[in-house]
Image (spheres, helix red, strand yellow):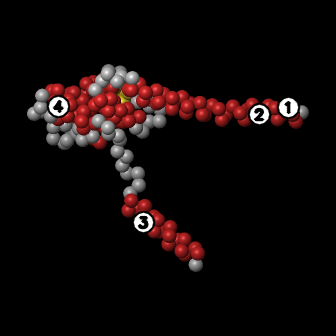
């Protein structure tokens, strides 16, 4: 009888570790396949692939389930802030939000890379008024190429130093 209990518990113990690791592997595989997709589009100019890489980095920012193929509005806004597309004069956060709403589908909450390029084209006309449409688009691409999300507010260095100082004082008191 004890053998039956042991046999019945072994399959139960084997099953849980397998199922949590499979979704993680699937997500990693999806992300890797997304990254490799940009490399087979080699006919495009180098700046476009760098633009797509920046798009994917911002698209997955803050979302562990994101594949990098579509970008949410908050990540679009973050990209525009972090890459200095928003200058406060010609392009504001309101302009960025309006362009996003205009470009995305009616029932959609995200934009694709192609829609992203359309949105940048719209903003480039506002941001670089003194340049031709083509030059303005190239300038806005240069602002974004090779960039990644800026992570702010994680740990303030001064606060960390204060904390470490307090820990040192506590350790000295405990050893005395």
- For label 2, the SS is helix
Residue at the spot of label 2: 10
In the rendered image, the quadrant that contains the C terminus is bottom right
In the rendered image, the quadrant that contains the N terminus is top right
Q: Sequence order check: which comes first, mark 2 or mark 3?
A: 2
Question: Residue pushed farthest bottom?
Answer: 176
Counting other residues with Cα less than 10 Å from the Cα at mark 1, is it few (<14), some (14-19), or many (20 or more)? few
Please say if the residues under marks 1 and 3 sit with CB atoms less than 8 Å apart.
Answer: no
Q: Nearer the viewer, residue 125 or 51?
A: 51
Indicate the quadrant where residue 38 lies. Answer: top left
Residue at the spot of label 3: 162
Q: Nearer the viewer, residue 86 or 39?
A: 39
Q: Sequence order check: which comes first, mark 3 or mark 4?
A: 4
Residue 93 position within the rendered picture, expressed as x and y whole percent measured from the top left: 24, 38
The residue sitting at 73% across, 32% down in the picture is 12
Residue at the spot of label 4: 136
**Mark-to-mark CA distance, 3 and 4:** 47 Å
Question: Residue pushed farthest right?
Answer: 1
Residue 4, labelled with which disc? 1
- For label 4, the SS is helix
**Mark-to-mark CA distance, 1 and 4:** 74 Å
């Amino acid at each position: 009888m004890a053998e039956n209990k042991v046999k019945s518990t072994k399959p139960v113990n084997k099953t849980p570790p397998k199922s949590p690791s499979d979704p993680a592997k699937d997500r990693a595989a999806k992300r890797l396949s997304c990254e490799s997709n940009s490399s087979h589009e080699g006919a495009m100019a180098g700046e476009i692939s760098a633009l797509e890489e920046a798009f994917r980095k911002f698209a997955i920012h803050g979302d562990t389930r994101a594949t990098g193929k579509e970008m949410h509005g908050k990540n679009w806004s973050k990209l525009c802030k972090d890459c200095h597309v928003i200058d406060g004069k010609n392009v504001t956060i309101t302009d960025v939000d309006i362009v996003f709403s205009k470009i995305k589908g009616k029932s959609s909450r995200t934009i694709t890379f192609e829609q992203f390029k359309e949105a940048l084209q719209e903003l480039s006309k506002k941001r670089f008024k003194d340049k031709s449409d083509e030059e303005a688009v190239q300038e806005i691409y240069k602002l974004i190429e090779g960039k990644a999300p800026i992570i702010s507010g994680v740990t303030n260095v001064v606060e960390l130093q204060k904390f470490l100082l307090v820990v040192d004082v506590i350790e000295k008191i405990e050893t005395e």
